[in-house]
Image (cartoon, rainbow, N blue to C red):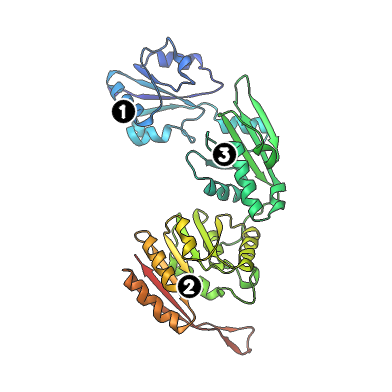
Amino acid sequence: MTTRILVMGVSHNALAPEQRQRIAACHAVVASDRFAPLVRGLCDTVLPVAPLAAMLDALAAALAGGDVAVLASGDPLFFGIGRTLIRRFGGERLVFFPALSAVQLACARFRVPWDDMAFLSLHGRDGGEVAARILAQRKVMLFTDQRNSPDRIAALLLARLGELGDQERIRDLHVRVAENLGLADERLVQDTLAGIAARRFAPLNMMLIEQEGLQEAESPLGLNEDEIRHSRGLITKDEVRAVTLHRLRLPARGVFWDVGAGSGSVALEAARCCPGLQVLAVEQKKEQQDNIRANIVRHRAWNVRLVAGSAPGVLAGLPDPDRVFIGGSGGRLEQIIDACAGRLAAGGRLVVNAVLPATAELAPARLAAAGLAVDVRRLRVERQARPGAEWQELNPITIITARK
């Protein structure tokens, strides 16, 4: 007979009589330091949860002697250890006994429905990515960890919104934290971002963030030039932007550099199309930097981060890109191409838009010299304001695509 893994959810830091009976019949039990006292006297072999890889090997060995119980907080299949156990041992060998999850308890305490809620685990995540993902949601419950604690998350959000000058959104964010749910020292806290940032919290907590008045975003692609703040007509035109994004073939996740971003129009639509993409808009001019900040706030493109400075020098401190768009070079096109091509990830794409014939001639040769496969296309656009009006011909654009 095949031995089984009994995965038991624990609520209120206590075991029900039926759970105790099942554990007593097992050959071994896996329990964290927090749950180990609950199984004392029930089973001779208690395996620690950490380190995870060692636990999985020990669990596999223990199965030779009989069933093994695994204790988990709440529902093991909701941001819990269930996924890891299924991946290692297969679903057929596992039996789950879920308890109330921390999300259910927190929402009950806060009296908040959770059928329309987003969920985000912060375990091991980078702070910059976290801020963007939180701000994109109307209502989100966070699974925190010791590094990404509520006070740190609040401070990250304050810093991100502060650098964009978005005081209105800072005021509109409602933050609640539920600590030690179901335990004797349970605590519920509701405060402003600044108030949460100034507090300290127990490691066991859930964090709920809500934004008042956040409406469903419109279509992610198709912003018009007049919807994007820019200066003196210096913006990648709508038709050119659409073709550029097509040639970039953006990944759902990864890093995208928009070098010489100008108003940030390409970065903006890239971010809206791919919310999981980290978009870095590199721009040296103060006026355009202000435009980028305003566009991020207006169109809620929180995964765009302004990198103020001139390329190629400022690129050194950025994570390696999966995609690069070079919209402006300030006369340093060769150096920028060399820097970008050398950092581009395997399978990545780099697109250069050229207005001047000299740029259209130089960029393909330089990209090919860097070992990239190059494709060149020319785009001519004509516009008619209304039926019967004269056609307006825009400057032709050469779009150079390079693949690594």
Disc 1 marks which amino acid? Asp
Viewer-closest of 337 and 220: 337
Q: Which residue is mark 1?
A: 57
Give me the C-alpha separation between circle 2 and circle 1: 51 Å
Find residue 11 and report its image quarter.
Answer: top right
Q: Which residue is mark 2?
A: 243
Disc 3 marks which amino acid? Leu
Decide which of tag 2 and tag 1 comes sooner along the chain. Answer: 1
Dot 2: what SS? helix
The residue shown at (41%, 67%) is 350
Left or right of 134? Residue 318 is left
Whether label 3 touches label 1, CB < 8 Å: no
Decide which of tag 2 and tag 3 comes sooner along the chain. Answer: 3
Residue 127 percent location from the top left of the image: 53, 45
Point out the image quarter for the C terminus: bottom left
Viewer-closest of 384 and 203: 203
Q: Residues within 10 Å of mark 2 (few under 14, many from 20)?
A: few
Give me the C-alpha separation between circle 2 and circle 3: 37 Å
In the depicted structure, whether residue 290 falls above or below residue 172: below
Q: Which residue is mark 3?
A: 142
In the depicted structure, whether residue 61 falls above or below residue 131: above
Q: Which residue is at the far top? A: 41
Viewer-closest of 167 and 376: 167
Decide which of tag 3 and tag 1 comes sooner along the chain. Answer: 1
